């Protein structure tokens, strides 16, 4: 069996024969021990990976409603201001109508802080009546609980809520001086009783020494899963070798991330052995303003768009063209910021069927 401690970042540093042995063991370990759906992200599966193309359904769509936010998180990566203007109601519903025409399966609203967007409930209801399977909100958790319950009534069945600390003082630092810790943890606990709730924990030098306590604290709130990730500015591999949570099997995403850390792999960045192409872009889309982007990370790291949304017939072909021409290893944003789950999908896609030449 492949042993995690044998892993290295760059096989080129090994002898050719040793590199081939490790690569073969790694491939077998991944294929035999883990299906994509076991990671815990509901849009990732082996079946999608085997059949993913520019003609398959859009499995994941994320729309940035605008850049307004009541927090000032120091690690926040906002999109290019040229494209990230607050969407008008007419523009949002024009975009949604076009997306429904090309058969989206799941949608996420983010920002900024999406609960500050006036037309959010109407947009959610519009998605609900179009039978969108998963309607998700990425929020800082600061809105009133009754408002979140209203969103559930309108059709939301997935909340991703930020919680970067286990105490009010550190939470205030991580949110840029905003003191709403008690309200947020109350909202997380109550919403977790009603629907699927994941908590995102961003760590950097301000809270890394509390990361274990924060994970345990979040577990006690009754959440569905826990996502840990270093900030883009920090981007270091935390020391999780001594983290042995008795509840780890309850949280697939948390388990996946901690195992990656223990194997010496950071969440962000490509290695030479990773797929230089991004098949994920073929049936996954991120939107801000009137433009669509390779992914939400690319958008937030100031990367340019693939195309605009005015001609619905061109969206999928534009994304196919980007896939065909783009080398992720040569793109600084992709090379430094591609997330572990995206790499996992792209590498597995190539294993299954590299059928677009």
Image (spheres, grey):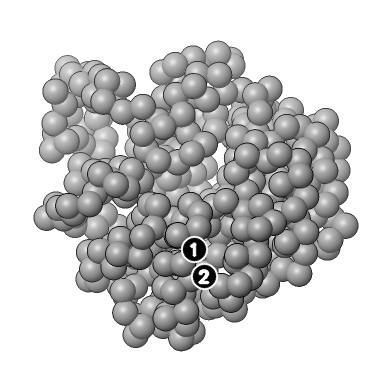
Q: Is residue 24 visible?
A: yes
Asked if residue 52 lies left or right of residue 348, the reply is: right
* Label 1: few (<14), some (14–19) or many (≥20) C-alpha neighbours in 10 Å: many
Residue at the spot 20% in from the left edge and 21% down from the top edge:
25
Quadrant position of the C terminus in the picture: top right
Asked if residue 154 lies left or right of residue 140, the reply is: right
Residue at the spot 34% in from the left edge and 85% down from the top edge:
169
**Which residue corresponds to mark 1?**
191
Front one among 349 and 224: 224
Asked if residue 189 lies left or right of residue 241, the reply is: right
**Residue 7: horizontal and vertical position, in percent?**
19, 35
Residue at the spot 70% in from the left edge and 64% down from the top edge:
66
Asked if residue 23 lies left or right of residue 311, the reply is: left
**Residue 262: horizontal and vertical position, in percent?**
19, 46
Quadrant position of the N terminus in the picture: top left
**Which residue corresponds to mark 2?**
141
Q: Decide which of tag 1 and tag 2 comes sooner along the chain.
A: 2
**Residue 34: horizontal and vertical position, in percent?**
31, 28
Disc 2, SS: loop
Q: Is residue 108 visible?
A: no
* Depicted 172 relative to depicted 254: above or below: below
**Residue 205: horizontal and vertical position, in percent?**
30, 71
Q: CA distance from mark 1 to mark 2?
A: 10 Å
């Amino acid at each position: 069996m492949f042993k995690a401690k044998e892993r290295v970042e760059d096989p080129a540093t090994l002898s050719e024969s040793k590199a081939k042995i490790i690569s073969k063991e790694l491939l077998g370990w991944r294929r035999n021990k883990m299906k994509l759906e076991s990671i815990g992200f509901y849009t990732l599966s082996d079946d999608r990976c085997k059949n993913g193309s520019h003609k398959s359904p859009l499995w994941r769509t994320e729309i940035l409603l605008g850049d307004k936010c009541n927090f000032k998180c120091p690690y926040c990566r906002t999109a290019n201001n040229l494209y990230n203007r607050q969407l008008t109601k007419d523009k949002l519903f024009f975009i949604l109508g076009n997306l429904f025409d090309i058969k989206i399966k799941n949608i996420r609203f983010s920002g900024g802080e999406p609960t500050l967007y006036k037309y959010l409930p109407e947009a959610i209801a519009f998605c609900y009546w179009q039978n969108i399977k998963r309607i998700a909100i990425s929020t800082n958790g600061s809105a009133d609980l009754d408002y979140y319950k209203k969103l559930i009534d309108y059709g939301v069945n997935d909340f991703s809520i930020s919680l970067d600390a286990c105490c009010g003082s550190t939470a205030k630092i991580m949110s840029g001086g905003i003191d709403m810790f008690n309200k947020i943890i109350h909202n997380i606990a109550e919403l977790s009783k009603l629907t699927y709730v994941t908590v995102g924990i961003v760590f950097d030098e301000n809270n890394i020494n509390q990361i274990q306590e924060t994970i345990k604290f979040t577990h006690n709130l009754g959440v569905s899963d826990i996502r840990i990730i270093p900030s883009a500015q920090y981007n270091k591999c935390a020391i999780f070798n001594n983290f042995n949570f008795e509840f780890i099997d309850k949280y697939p995403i948390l388990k996946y991330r901690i195992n990656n850390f223990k194997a010496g792999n950071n969440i962000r960045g490509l290695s030479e052995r990773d797929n230089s192409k991004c098949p994920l872009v073929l049936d996954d889309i991120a939107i801000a303003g009137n433009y669509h982007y390779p992914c939400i990370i690319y958008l937030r790291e100031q990367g340019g768009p693939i195309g605009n949304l005015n001609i619905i017939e061109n969206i999928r072909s534009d994304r196919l063209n980007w896939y065909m021409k783009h080398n992720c290893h040569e793109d600084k944003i992709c090379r430094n910021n591609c997330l572990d789950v995206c790499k996992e999908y792209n590498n597995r896609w190539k294993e299954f069927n590299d059928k677009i030449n």
